[in-house]
Amino acid sequence: MIPDIVRSLLAEPRAPGAPRRVWRDWLLVAVLVPAAVLEGVLGDHVVWPAVSIIVALGLAYALLWRRTHPLQVVLAVFGTHFVTFVAAAIAGVGAVGVYASILTLLLPYALLRWGSGREVAIGVPVILVAGVVGTAEDYNGLGEAVAGLIFLFIPAVLGAAVRFAVTSRSRELDQVKLLERQQLARELHDTVAHHVSAIAIRAQAGQVVAASRPEAAAEALAVIEDEASRTLAEMRLVVGSLRDEASAELAPQPGLVELRGLARADGRPAVYVDVSGELGTLGAAVGTALFRIAQESVTNAVRHARQATRVDVAVTESGDEVLLTVRDDGVDAAASYLTGYGLIGMTERAALLGGTLDAGPDPAGGWTVRAVLPKSGRDR
């Protein structure tokens, strides 16, 4: 079991999305460089001022690369510290360095936050060795030595914790998006399967009465039946891998008709639904998406909108697009809405159909979800 864990850790890739430079990096350099130079020149406690300043300037440069090249930076900086500690011990002088070099603590954090498993496996022992040598070179008792090593590795623990939290969150988001894609694939499959099945049935009925019709009609009906059955079989095969169920229900998915069913005047909050405009040409997938988004939004409002008395659901058309707005009159619901994954799923569903979804506090009070989808459901 332990070898498997070790292999898994060593196979861990670098954390994605490491920023090359941010404004904080340049601020650190702007503070570190003059502070190190002034301390090296004016500080009476500094041994070997020239060496201390050069080391500090090298650290300032290395900080700019700590996320994209964490292992190389750790090896360079802690290797330099190791050499200076050994040289100071041989020369019999005190600690070499300036107080500004405290920013070296950012490197263990960066290594555990952004480095790969192999880089961490190499870099952590290097940090430990440099820390032990530095502590031995300026030894002031066991307690202080242990405290110093703990202080050195606290940033590394923080880096690992942040990495774990971000990775877990990213995986959860990916899972939500995957489930939403599976749900959309299921709905598309069921809707098309319903219509194709109807075509096949019509073709079979045509064959029954074909005896009294021209022979060409019977042949055409046979082709329709064959093509419809083949299309249905292929769709079941392709989309079936995305489903948990073994077969599809040959019934249409909910749409605008079912959306009106969300209305309830006797509830708290009460839900009012208004559908207007020429929506007869609305694609089946778009109608289902409108229902799902409205259903999720109403559910969120009922669960999270404090003191809400009503939820308004409105569907209108705007050219080739259809607009869905769900607004409640509750208070202080933002934190509750944003902690779940419902908004992520709704946004993913809208994007898959070529639309957009925005959600946030309404200036007039309450919370508003606004989705814009193309009527045809095609990508823009």
Image (spheres, rainbow, N blue to C red):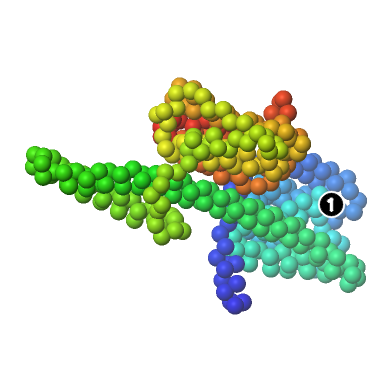
Q: Position of residue 302 (x, y in %)?
A: 68, 41
The residue singled out by tag 1 in the image is 99
Asked where in the image residue 370 lies, by quadrant, the reply is top right
Residue 44 vertical placement versus 290 (above, below): below
Foreground pick, 92 / 312: 312
Apparent side of residue 304 relative to residue 171 in the rendered image (left or right): right
Q: Is 223 or 175 nearer to us in this picture? A: 223
In the image, 82 versus 298, the foreground residue is 298
| Image position, residue 285 (x, y; %) | 44, 39
Q: Position of residue 34 (x, y in %)?
A: 79, 41
Residue at x-position 53% and y-position 41%: 292
Instruction: Find residue 104 and report its image quarter.
Output: bottom right
Dividing the image into 4 quarters, which one contains the C terminus?
top left
Residue ID at (46%, 46%): 184
Q: Quadrant of residue 237?
A: bottom left
Number of numbered markers: 1
Instruction: Please indicate, yes or no, whether residue 369 appears anywhere in the rendered image.
Output: no
Question: What element does badge 1 sit on?
Answer: helix
Q: Is residue 148 left or right of residue 338?
A: right
Left or right of residue 96: residue 255: left
Q: Residues within 10 Å of mark 1 (few under 14, many from 20)?
A: some
In this view of the protein, can residue 257 be seen by the observer? yes
Q: Is residue 48 left or right of residue 20?
A: right
